[in-house]
Amino acid sequence: MEETQDDPGGAFVWGEAERRAALGDVAYLRELGARLSDQYQDATERARTYAHQLGHVIRVLALTPGRQSLVELMRLVDEKRRPSHPRELASLLAEHQRPADLAATVFGRPGAGTADELAPCLFHELLLRSADMQGIPQPRSSHTLAWLPARLLDFEAGAAFPHRTVNGSAGGSGTAMPAEGRLDPPVPRTTERSALRNTATVEVHESIVSAPQAGDWGHFDAWVFRLDEDLDPVLVPALLPALPMPCTEVGPTGRFEVALSPLGEVWRLLFATASMGGVYGGGVGGAYGRMWAWRSMAGLAGAPAGAGAEEAERLARETTWFRFEADSEWFHNEIGCDFGIAALSPDHRRLAVLAATDTD
């Protein structure tokens, strides 16, 4: 096969394929395609290697404390438009660098313009860690994360984060039922299903499942039930197993655990679900983990479409929250990989449910 020198690969000249085809030399075309395929695979593997090596260098710079390493990292980020994952970088920086150094080098750099995604993410990563926010500017009003409160609320305190080193990371947050506030319904339970029907719209459903969807959990679903009269919160544990949801079909004696839960516990579960992800998901990091935890919380609490964070917070504080788990076939029933949340609205006329499950 005659080689050409039209490109660095030495195997392709524009128009040559058409000329050979016209001459009937289809064997040449097959050989050319095979060679290009091999070159493409080699280039892809090299690009993957370079990306891995570049990621390692960025990680080392981010995890090396000190202003000088930050200066060099930001030069690399701004000059080469790398990395392509600012959310992950923001999380690394918040974990290993001093807020004062970040204020000077990340937020105060010339490259921190309107197109910058690193600064807004880093703001919320630091906020969630109760960092000293002096000199740390809030995200611009047009940014998605600007919807979130610019202060850390009491129920957000104590959020869990992964712990990263140069060579890897470890983290995760279990979903085990709390020991306190338990209200497990007695057995045997009735097998009769409630006549209530799911009224969740597509928009409400998407809001409620925001956290497990962002965290790439294996399976999740949401339901909303409208009640004809006020429901006393003490009756919720008995009602949950009877609701027409596949995640609660456990029979009269199957395990069904329910606990009254503080808002902070529910929010931290939603945050871990989104920020650290499921078994095979890496999560979306702290900043967007906060965003999607709030979206799920707002949907469960019944916040109307377009509501601001202040309205979502008010409703969430007035909502009665429950956690539950069940040995239904819908759940995988693996430790740390199942959870259910139920939210009774302030007027006691709406019961919203989120369930999620994952497995390896």
Image (cartoon, rainbow, N blue to C red):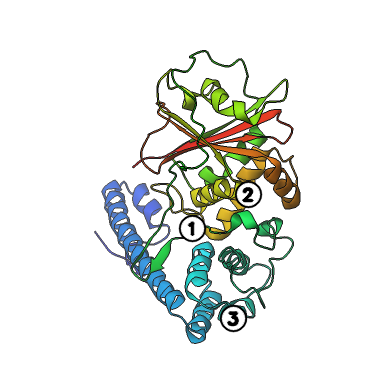
Instruction: Assess whether mark 3 and mark 1 are in contact (beta carbons under 8 angstroms).
Output: no
Between the residue at mark 2 and the residue at mark 3, the CA separation in whole angstroms equals 28 Å
Q: Nearer the viewer, mark 2 or mark 1?
A: 1
Outermost residue toward the top in this view: 192
* Total marks placed: 3
The amino acid at mark 3 is Ala
Residue located at (36% from left, 41% from top): 335
In the rendered view, does 161 fall on the left or right side of 204?
left
What element does badge 1 sit on? Answer: loop
* Callout 3 crowding tier (Cα within 10 Å): few <14, some 14–19, many ≥20: some
Q: In this view, does 258 lie above or below 250?
A: below
Q: Is any atom of residue 154 visible in this view?
A: yes
Q: Nearer the viewer, residue 241 or 122?
A: 241
In the rendered view, does 232 fall on the left or right side of 276?
right
Res 100 label: 3
The spot of residue 119 in percent (x, y) is: 61, 69
Instruction: Assess whether mark 1 and mark 2 are in contact (beta carbons under 8 angstroms).
Output: no
- The disc, 2 or 3, on the residue closer to the chain's N-terminal end is 3
The amino acid at mark 2 is Trp
The spot of residue 29 in percent (x, y) is: 31, 50
The spot of residue 70 in percent (x, y) is: 51, 81
In the rendered view, does 314 fall on the left or right side of 262?
right
Q: Is residue 131 above or below residue 283?
A: below
- The disc, 2 or 1, on the residue closer to the chain's N-terminal end is 1
Q: Name the residue under label 2.
A: 294
The amino acid at mark 1 is Ala
The spot of residue 92 in percent (x, y) is: 47, 68
Q: Mark 1 points at which residue?
A: 160
